[in-house]
Each structure stands twice: as C-alpha cells, then as structure tokens.
Image: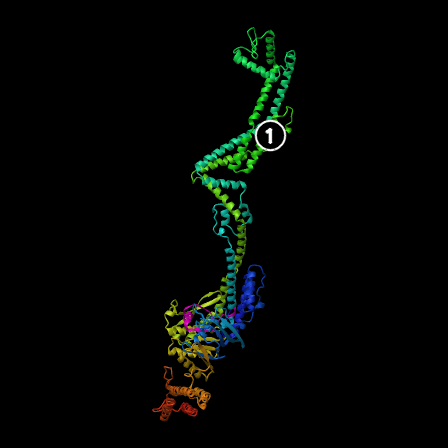
Amino acid sequence: MTVTTSGKSDESSNEASALSEIVSWSVDAPDWQRDALRRLCQREKLDEADSADLLAICKGTKAASPVTADHIRDPGAATAEVSLTKLHNLRNVNALQPGETLSFQKSGLTVIYGDNGAGKSGYARVLKQACRARLLKGDVVLPNINAASPGAPQAELGFTIGGQNRSFIWQQGTATDPILTAVSVFDSRTATVHVDATNELAYTPVPLKILAYLADACGILKGKLTAEIKVLQDQTPAMLREVKVGPQTAVGKLLAALSAKTKVEAVEALAGLTPEQIAELKQLDSDLASDPVRAARSLQTLRTKIEEGSTSLANLVATVSDQNIQNMLGLKGEFEAARSAAALASADLFSGEPLPNVGTPVWRTLWDAARRYSEEAAYAGRDFPVVGHDARCVLCHQELDTEASSRLGRFETFIQDESKRREEAARAAYDAAVDELVAARFSMISLRKLVSVIRDDLEDEALANAVRLCGLAHNWRLRAAMTLSADASLLDLPRGKEFDFGLFAAHVDALAKRAAALVAEKSSPERLAMVSRRDELAAREWLATVKADVIAQIGRLVSIDGLNKAAKATATNKITALSTQLAGALVTHRLRARFAQEVDKFGVAGLAVELQQARSSAGIPYFHVRLISKPDKPVGEILSEGEHRCVALAAFMAELATTEATSSIVFDDPVSSLDHIHRDKVAARLAMESLKRQVIIFTHDIAFLVLLEEVCRATRERAAIPMAYRVVSRGADMAGFCNTEPPANVLPVEKVIPQMRKHLNNVKIHHERGDQASWRREVGSFEKELRESWERAVEEAVSPVIKRLSQKVYTDGLIKLTVLNETDCITMREAFGRCSRLIHSQPGELNPKLPTPIEIEGEISALESWITGVKVRQDAAK
C-alpha cells in the first residue's frame, strides 16, 4: 500500500485501502472478531449490548454476522471538528464559585488570565479530565473542602461538532463523552510525560482506530471470560482444593487428574464400598491401631476357630452325602435280613422252651452279659457255658441239672450257628455306619459359636448366615436319615444347603496374611500392602460422601474448558501485527517529519532530537523523543528546563498535525520556566495555530499575555487573528469569578478611555444626588485609573523602541521618538499632577471640595488628546 501525505483526499484514499485490507484480513479471524469489525465499521465504538452479543458469539451460543466490503464506512467521518463554547454549571470543583460561566471564543485565540489562587487552574483541571490529556497519577479534581457535604465534582461543557451545538455533563469518576477526546490539553506539569515517556498518538487514523477498538474488545471479552472462569473456579469445594486422600490411591489419582475429560462413570465406579469392604476397612483400622503381637495372636486363635469349624461342617456335609446314607441304609437292610433269618432259626430250635422269645435281641443281650460274667468272673479260663455236676447257673447261681445243662448247650449252639453269626456281623456293620453318622453331627452349641465368630469377629454376615443354614440343614438331614427304613428312597430326605467352602479358605488365608503383616516390620511389603489397602478403601469410602461435588466439579471443568477455548479467540497478536503494518504506512513517517518541523518552529532545532516509534501495543503505535547522537540517553537528563518545555510542545503539536481535523487545543501554563527568546517563539507558534483551530491558553504570566497581544497585532496585516480575553479572579471566600473584559494593564490606553467614560456616566449620579461618600470613592478610583493610564500612555509613546515586559530594543522605531517635544512633556506632567490632587487634601482644608464629573471628563479628554496627538505624529514619522 502506497501512502502519500500531499492532501486529505490522498489520506482518505489510503485509509479506504487500509479498511479493505482489514476486511480481507478478517477472513481468517475468529467469528466474533469478524462480527465486531462489522459493528466498528458502522459506528464509533462498541457498547455493553455489543459486548454481550460478541461474548455469546465467542462462546458459540449465537451466530455471527461477519464484516464485508459493504460495511466499510467513509474514513472522512472521523475528521469532524470539535470546538469548545463554554464551561459552566460547576459544582464542588475546588473552591470555584457556582453559577459562573467561562466562555471561549469560537475561533482564534482565547486567553484566560488569572493570578495565583484566582481559580484559573480549577477550570483547567476540569478540561484535562473531560478532554484528552496525559495526566499524572492521582491527578484528579478535588471538591470544595470548605463545603459542608461536598459531592463529586461536576461541570457542564458546551461544544460544537460539525457546526451543531452539544453539551455534556462531566462528573468525576465517570466516563467522558468520547467525542471530547478530540480536544487535546497540554499541561506544563506533564511535559515530562510528553518528552520522556512513550505515548499514544493524539490522532489515530480510522483503520488503526478500528483495530484499536477491536483490541479493546478482545480485552473486554477476555476479562469477561476470565471473570466467568474465576467464578467457576471459586466454586470448587474446599475438599477438592486440598484432597485428603493418598495420592497413590485410585481415588487420589482420579482427583489429581480431574479434568473436563474425566468420565462420570469412573467416579461412580470408585465411590463407595460393599458391606464386605466396609468390614474389611474397619478391621484394617483396628489392626493397624492395636498392639501387633497381641493382634497377631488373636488372629491366629480366630484362624484356628475358623479352620476347626470349617472342618466340622465339612465333615457333616460329607457324612450325610447320598452315598454314605445309601450305604447306611444298605447295611441296615442286610442287618434286618440277617436278624429275620436268625429269628426263624430260633423259633424252630426253642419252640418247646418254657419261656418265649429265646434268641431275640433282648434275650441275646442277657446271654452276652452271662457270657462275659462267666468268662471274666465266675469261671475264668473256662469255655462258656460251663456245665456239669459242680456247675451253677451264672444268672441264678442254682446248680445245673441235666435239663438245664442241656438247655444251655442248645443256647450256645444257637449262638454259634451261621445265621446267628451273619446277623451279628450285619449288626456290627450297621452299628458302625450309624456311629459314623452320629459322630458327624454338628451340635447346635458348636454351630452357634461358629456362626457368632464369623458374624462378630470376621464381620461377614452373609457367610455367617450361610454357615448357619448349612449346619441346620445337614443336621436335620442326619436326623432324618437315622429314621429311614432300609427300603426308603433318598428323595424322602431333606436336601442339604449348598455351601462354598472356599469362602472359609479365603478368610483363613486373609487371617494368616493379616497376622503376618502385623508382626512384620513397618517397611515390610506385607505391612505396606496392609496400609495401602486401608488407604484405598478409606479413599473410596470418602469419595462416596463427596461424589455429588466431584461430579458437579467435572461439569464446572467442562464449562471452564469451553471458556478457555473461547478465550483463545481473544488473542491480540495478529491484530497488533496488522496495526503495526498499517501504522508504518499511515502515521509513522509523517509524524517524525512533522516533529522535526515543530522543533524548528519552537527555536530548538539545534538540539538534534528526533521522534522514534518505540513499540505498538494493542494496535496503537507509541513514540518517544530521543537525542540523535545519544539515543539511549533520556532527553530529560540533557535538556535545560526551557528546552525541555519547547521539545514537549513540539511533540504535542506534531501529534496533532497527523490529522486534517482541527479540533480545539488547550494549553495550561505553556511558558513556565521559559526565557524571553523561547517565549516569543511559543507565542508566535500558538498565535499562528489559532488561524487553523480554536486555541485556548490558561496563563498567569502577564508578560506572555502581552507577547500574545503583540503577535496577534503584528500579523493582522497578513491574517486576522481574533484574540479574546477572559479574566478569572478571586473574591473574599470563593474563586473562579469570570469576566470577559481583558486585564486593564494589557489593554491599549485608547481602549481604556471609552471604559472610563462609560464608568463615569454610570456613577455621576452619586454627585448629582449629593452622595458625597459614594462619590468620594469613585473619584479615588478615577484618580488611580487616570494616573495608571498616563503611565501607560508614556509607555506606548516610547514603545516603538522599548516595550513593556520585553527585553528587546527596537532600533528601527527610534525615529518615532523624535516627534515628542517639550510641550508633550509639560502637558503630561501637569495632567499627572492634577490627577494626584483630585482627592488629596490641601493644607488647611478639613473638607476639600471634590471634582465634578465635568472636571473628570476634562481630565479624560486631556489624556485622549495627548495620546491622539502623539500617535498621529508617530504614524507620520514612518
């Protein structure tokens, strides 16, 4: 893009090209920035509603309407001129009198003069706050400290833009009207800022301004997004900020890595414990808190109880198996069959015996008892039965006759018979089977003890119930089996409860490991594993209590992740790069060249200083003043105070010259610390600037005021420089009283004379009414004013050579002094003397006669005649 500075049309054309380049650049920009550019191309700045819309677009909740070439506005719309008309309706501004109006001349030069403490600076401070000025830190407008309850300082500014009158009510602490920033204010106290610091351009071309506002929007949106993120972050529960669970636990790892990608299912899976795990955690806490040796012994005892109970229950279950019961019933059948066979044999053999049921089990019991008594006591060593002539019955101890001996023999023979032996064998086998069943029975006492141990010590309620049911069922099966007939079906028996004896093994193994871990060293793998398990279970138990908070936090993290992604679209690096590129073409070179010209105009061209671009931030270029020979040395350390001020003024004026718009400029005490040479240059430069724009100057320097007056007079032949005076004065209690009349000691004497005549006409009524006191005061005022006017008349008479408050001698005006003669001197001295005697008492007079209005008019006429005569002759002496 080629840039020229030959005229406004070229600049506008280049700005239009830059706007087109911005539209092309925006194709790759985030959607919200494209929408923002559309809005900025249509109006000056974005408001809160725009920011809300753009934030929604940035967050993806609203569609964008991108900028196109049709949205580019005329760059000339930003060149409207702003001029100040008045500053009024001041409230709580320092000690300034409310109701006063400080007006400004529409064009040309307006000089506001006021002595120290008159209130002039109060008006200037308001303008610095409401318009564009580089303010020092803490530079604010203070309220009236003498007011009973001062509010915020406030004032109303009248101004024109494009010829239309507007007004704005400024209040301390609130935003000013953006259009008023077109008015620039130079403050002598901030001259260091202009020279030593890097500053924003006073004027920013439309393309750079659009990019600057876009960068501002980036900051605003980023701030809003950051605020939303902070709100969400602040909602993080304290328990998640400082997680109490071990970092090596699954829960600790989950929380440490908690992010928007964390699955809720992962939290659900780790939150909470089963009843078995709750019991395990309780046991681990107890084990780790108790005496390890004693706890290990208790665990070993418990292990023994579990193992014994497990063995007894397993034995019961195995004993009452279908196979064992079927085997027992088979033996019972065999015994019953053998017993029947023996009974038949007995019935045949003993049918003739005197007593019945010989050979039955009851009888057999008696017979076996007799056998044992005979063999072990009565007839030890002899075979049973013992019969013979000396033998006796072992039961009744009666001697055995032949019949009794024969009967005993038959009985023994029966016992020794094969059928009886089979019966005995079958009986023995059956009894053994029955004894085995009986031995396997699990007593209810033992069963209750085992169930209690499992429930209370192992804290395994499920296993305890299973053991109880298993024991009861199999004991009942055993009892039922004992009552079955030999030919009964196993289907008639109750079925035993299925039971997993591996559950016992798991507990036994766990008890063994716990016991080993308890007696192991603290750093041993066994004990560390025990601690790790305890921590893992405790973490999961804790997670269950905060699960809802964790799931809610995941939701917040998802929202934060989305906001962070949106915040990435507020980066300004690409905006700054484009702005820097455009600034180099539109502003930089022009500003540097203009600064060099301004330095020359202010009479400091020999300093060899230049304006350099320092950097570009958020789309706005920044510049600073540097010595050409020593660019790294701050100029404030090299320049004198006067040079420093002139360079600052040059920088200020150069900035303003980068635009064709000619809005007002305000100078607050621009010549402080300047010598007469630099004052002349500043006066001339500001006077010439007032030909293009409204220039307002606040000063308490009467010499500078006279210089401005002389500059404006000297250039009137070439161009009219309208100059208006405003005087700010102080009263008894308040300051800031405004007057549109110039200071009397600045006005030419010929302008003072009409004012005196007007005043005389207003006050002569006192003389006419005979109000001697009031007329005396007025006569005294005229006496003083006439004397000062004669002194000023003399000053003007010699001004062609020597001017008041000037250190120059104008030798080319020496010829004009030759017109003065002795008569002029006598006339002046006599008139000056009469003025001194107007009110002063003469010797011997107690009540001197006061001059009449006619006499005072005569003195005024004498002054006017003298001035006119000298001036006519001096003009002729050219």
Residue 219 % position (x, y):
50, 63
Which quadrant would residue 697 be assigned to in this image?
Answer: bottom left
Q: Quadrant of residue 783?
A: bottom left
Q: Position of residue 553 (x, y in %)?
A: 53, 52
Inspect this view and state whether residue 162 appears.
no
Q: How many marks?
A: 1
Within the image, what quadrant is residue 767 found in? bottom left
Residue 701 in view: yes
- Point out the stretch of residues depicted in magenta: 184-207
Residue sitting farthest toward the left: 843
Q: Is residue 656 above or below residue 463?
A: below
Tell me: 751 left or right of 60: left
Q: Per the image, is 189 magenta?
A: yes
The C terminus, quarter of image: bottom left
Q: Among all residues in the image, which is located at the extreme bottom?
A: 823
Determine whether the residue tagged by mark 1 lies in a helix, strand or loop.
Answer: helix
Residue at which label 1 appears: 476
Residue count near mark 1 (Cα–Cα under 10 Å), binned few <14, some 14–19, many ≥20: some
Horizontally, residue 497 falls left or right of residue 643, namely: right
Q: Look at label 1 and name its amino acid.
A: Trp
Identify whether 729 is placed above or below 360: below
Residue 672: within the magenta?
no
Outermost residue to the top: 389
Does residue 337 lie above or below 860 as drawn? above
The residue drawn where x is 42% and y is 39% is 521
The scheme the figure's colours follow is: rainbow
- Depth order, front residue of 618/765: 765
Where in the figure is residue 492, as x and y percent of width and height?
Answer: 64, 29
User: Residue 842: where, in percent of width, then height?
Assistant: 35, 91
